[in-house]
Amino acid sequence: MEYVVAAVILLVVLVVGAIGLVVPRMRRRELPPSQTGGDTATLERPSAAEPGVRTPPLVVPAEADEGLPPLLEREPEVAEPEVVEPPKPEIERPEPTAGRLVRLRARLSRSQNIFGRGLLTVLSRDHLDEDAWEEIEDSLITADVGVEATQVIVERLRERVRVLGTRTVAEVREQLAEELVAALDPEMDRTLRTTPHDGRPAVMLVVGVNGAGKTTTCGKIGRVLIADGRSVLFGAADTFRAAAADQIATWGERVGAETVRGPEGGDPASVAFDAVKRGIDIDVDTVVIDTAGRLQNKVGLMDELGKVKRVVEKHGPVDETLLVLDATTGQNGLEQARVFTEVVDVTGVVLTKLDGTAKGGIVIAVQRKLGIPVKLVGLGEGPDDLAPFEPAAFVEALLGSAT
């Protein structure tokens, strides 16, 4: 009986051992070769459970690749990002400035109420007595012509009316226009010195108090120069007002002019120097430098402005120093002009915001008191609402129609 039990145990052991040898071999098999003869992809199987047994490669037909579950994780295909060029701003071409003041005469409508309609109403009376002449004086003074200039204009006009016996409104208007033009001194040189020198550009320094519209005026001056055929570079030397450099750069982009700027709060004299140097390097006609606004009674700030000019002059003399005056400030603008002239030798005045004031006579007061010509006048908020100053056209616009 013991022999029978031993034989059964031995038989069981043999059967189990045979199964252990046969089953792994049944697991190792190859897929049938591709029937299409196409390319095949070869992948390695994971290692077999038995130590020391090398697993043969698994051959997968390329055509069947998509139909089988993935054996290995594939790298996802990443599309190349499409590079989109930002649209270039369209370069604007300002219209030539010739005759611009005449085209903008409607902007002086508020001043016409003082200079034109009010004065002509008085002058058209049959008899001009002392009360009438006092009304004329008051109108001119209210329009910021200034006391001294008003007295001269009225005295000359009274004499002409008396001698010539003028009676019609048209004749009186013509005589008044002649006296106002004479008070504006039409012989003054109002040309902008923007012609480049041998090897360096002309340099224009723009100064003024806070709030006069100086940075905007710089942008408009650039458009005036480009309209008249000059190439321009802007220097953003107002480093204390955060938006000033961005503002002047935007004006430049519109007309294709480069802007040189520095770090916020940096040295304005350094920015001005670099702007002129850059202008020399790229051979532009004119460099327009915007400076920070400052009150004329702040000694430290005025000294800094003097430094800006001295540093710029290491490249050569400053050709034009323009003072931006707000026409609405009235006679206070005269004090501003006087102090700025002492510090940086102002060569011309840009009178802004004439469209929003009835005080157009400030033009006469500035020139008579300081001997500085008004070279440009601002008559609106549009980009091309800055015009070269022409005395006769200006007076005609102020007086309006005699009818």
Image: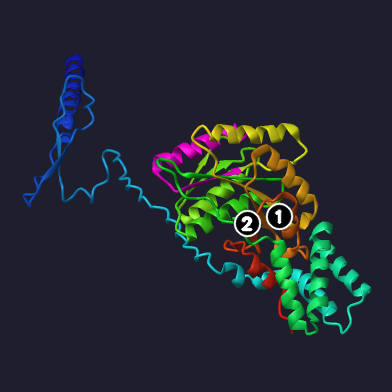
Residue located farthest toward the left when viewing the structure as drawn? 37
Which residue in the protein does label 2 denote? 188
Quadrant of the drawing holding the C terminus: bottom right
| Residue 268 visible to the viewer | no
Q: Position of residue 40 (x, y in %)?
A: 12, 44
Image coordinates of residue 134 in percent, x first then y, are 90, 69
State the residue lying farthest toward the top. Answer: 2
Q: Amino acid at mark 2?
A: Met
Q: Nearer the viewer, residue 36 or 199?
A: 199
Horizontal and vertical percent position of residue 283: 40, 44
The stretch in magenta equals: 264-290
Residue 367's tag is 1
The image quadrant where one finds the N terminus is: top left
Q: Using the image, determine if residue 324 lies above or below residue 117.
A: above
Point 71% across, 55% down: residue: 367
- Mark 2 and mark 1: Cα distance apart in space: 9 Å
Q: How many marks?
A: 2
Q: Residue at x 64, y 62 (%)?
A: 186
**Res 336 visible:** yes
In the rendered structure, the answer to whether residue 257 lies left or right of residue 79 reads: right
Quarter residue 183 falls in: bottom right
Quarter of image, res 49: top left
Q: Secondary structure at mark 1?
A: helix
Name the secondary structure under disc 2. Answer: loop
Way the structure is coloured? rainbow
Circles 2 and 1: CB atoms closer than 8 Å: yes
- In the rendered structure, which amino acid carries the disc numbered 1? Gln
Q: Is residue 286 part of the magenta span, yes or no?
A: yes
Q: Is 28 or 23 nearer to us in this picture? A: 28
Where, by quadrant of the figure, is residue 366 drawn? bottom right
